[in-house]
């Protein structure tokens, strides 16, 4: 029986409170989490480190979430991305999805809904530790 590898997740949001909440939530499910509070830092980290998933805020200093994804895709980085935004703008959401974002969610989002989205994207057929 193979050992289940903890997913490596990048979380970037300009709110340290939000990044800490997401980090704690994801760690409860066995994820290894790197947190950042700036879009430019997220862009650089994603270019130098392989992640199983990135959860990005849309509006951050440095680069907005969609710009990070556009630059990653242009560099050949295929990391799945969830963007979470307080700006409930369906045009921005549709543009983000067209740019290769896997899910675009609006804040506020419950921990349960976030984990559901993460599981959909990371579903490899192996159970998460709590399954």
Image (cartoon, rainbow, N blue to C red):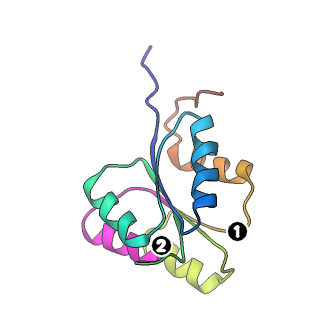
For the C terminus, the quadrant is top right
| In-image side of 10 versus 15 (left or right) | left
Question: On screen, 4 above or below 75?
Answer: above
Label 2 residue SS: helix
Query: Residue 50, position in %: x, y?
Result: 32, 49
- Closer-to-camera residue (123/37): 37
| Disc 2 to disc 1, C-alpha distance | 14 Å
For the N terminus, the quadrant is top left
Q: Earlier in the sequence, mark 2 or mark 1?
A: 2
| Magenta part of the chain | 64-81
Query: Given the current orientation, which residue lies at the most extreme front position?
Result: 16
Q: Reply yes or no: does residue 65 show up in magenta.
A: yes
| In-image side of 12 versus 67 (left or right) | right
Residue pointed to by mark 2: 65
Question: On screen, 119 above or below 55?
Answer: above
Question: On screen, 8 above or below 2?
Answer: below
Label 1 residue SS: loop
Q: Residue at x 60, y 86 (%)?
A: 91
Q: Which mark is residue 3?
A: none
Query: Residue 31, position in %: x, y?
Result: 51, 38
């Amino acid at each position: 029986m193979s050992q289940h590898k903890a997913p490596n997740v990048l979380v970037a949001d300009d709110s340290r409170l939000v990044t800490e909440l997401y980090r704690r939530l994801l760690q409860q499910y066995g994820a290894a989490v790197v947190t950042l509070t700036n879009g430019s830092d997220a862009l650089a980290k994603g270019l130098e480190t392989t992640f199983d998933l990135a959860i990005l805020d849309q509006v951050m200093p440095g680069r907005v979430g969609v710009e990070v994804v556009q630059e990653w895709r242009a560099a050949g980085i295929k990391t799945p991305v969830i963007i979470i935004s307080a700006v409930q703008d369906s045009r921005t959401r549709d543009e983000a999805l067209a740019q290769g974002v896997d899910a675009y969610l609006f804040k506020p989002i419950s921990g349960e809904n976030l984990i559901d989205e993460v599981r959909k994207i990371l579903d490899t057929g192996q159970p998460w530790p709590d399954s």
